[in-house]
Image (tube, grey):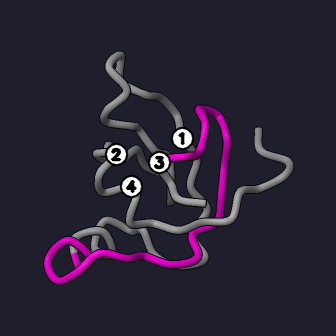
Amino acid sequence: MTLDQLGVGNSGIILKVGGAGALRRRLLDMGLTPKTRVMVRKVAPMGDPIELHLRGYELTLRLEDAREIELEAEEDAQ
């Protein structure tokens, strides 16, 4: 599954960060690295962007960019 498919309040562990060149580097620099736990906090009223919680901070990401991040959903998300 990809990050854009994760529902509000659900968590997952990043498996792979896709994209190419500057996009991939930017995602990695923002802390979206493999084995990182990420939770979807909110979705904007029109559905884009989404607000994530990871590594103790909040990050807003466009759905287009979230599609480049593969993750494994956690069963016991809170």
Q: Determine the secondary structure under disc 3.
A: helix
Label 2 CA crowd tier, 10 Å (few <14, some 14–19, many 20+): some
Q: Nearer the viewer, mark 1 or mark 2?
A: 2
Q: Determine the secondary structure under disc 2.
A: helix
Q: Is residue 7 left or right of residue 19?
A: right
* Alpha carbon separation for disc pair 2 and 3: 6 Å
Question: Are the residues tagged 2 and 4 within 8 Å (C-beta)?
Answer: yes
> For this rendering, which residue is in front, 38 or 75?
75
> For this rendering, which residue is in front, 54 or 15?
15
Q: Is residue 53 left or right of residue 15?
A: left
Type of amino acid at the residue the image marks with label 4? Ala
Q: Which residues are magenta?
A: 5-25
The earlier-in-sequence mark between 2 and 3 is 3
* Residue annotated with mark 3: 4
Say whether residue 13 is magenta. yes
* Alpha carbon separation for disc pair 4 and 3: 5 Å
The C terminus - image quarter: top right
The earlier-in-sequence mark between 1 and 2 is 1
Relative height, residue 32 to residue 51 (above, below) = below
Question: Are the residues tagged 1 and 3 within 8 Å (C-beta)?
Answer: no
Name the disc covering residue 63, or none: 2
Name the disc covering residue 40, or none: 1
Look at 28% across and 45% down and name the residue there. Answer: 62
Question: Are the residues tagged 2 and 3 within 8 Å (C-beta)?
Answer: yes
Look at 40% across and 58% down and name the residue there. Answer: 67
Type of amino acid at the residue the image marks with label 1? Val
* Alpha carbon separation for disc pair 1 and 4: 11 Å
Type of amino acid at the residue the image marks with label 3? Asp
Name the disc covering residue 26, or none: none
Q: Determine the secondary structure under disc 1.
A: strand
Q: How many marks?
A: 4
Label 4 CA crowd tier, 10 Å (few <14, some 14–19, many 20+): many
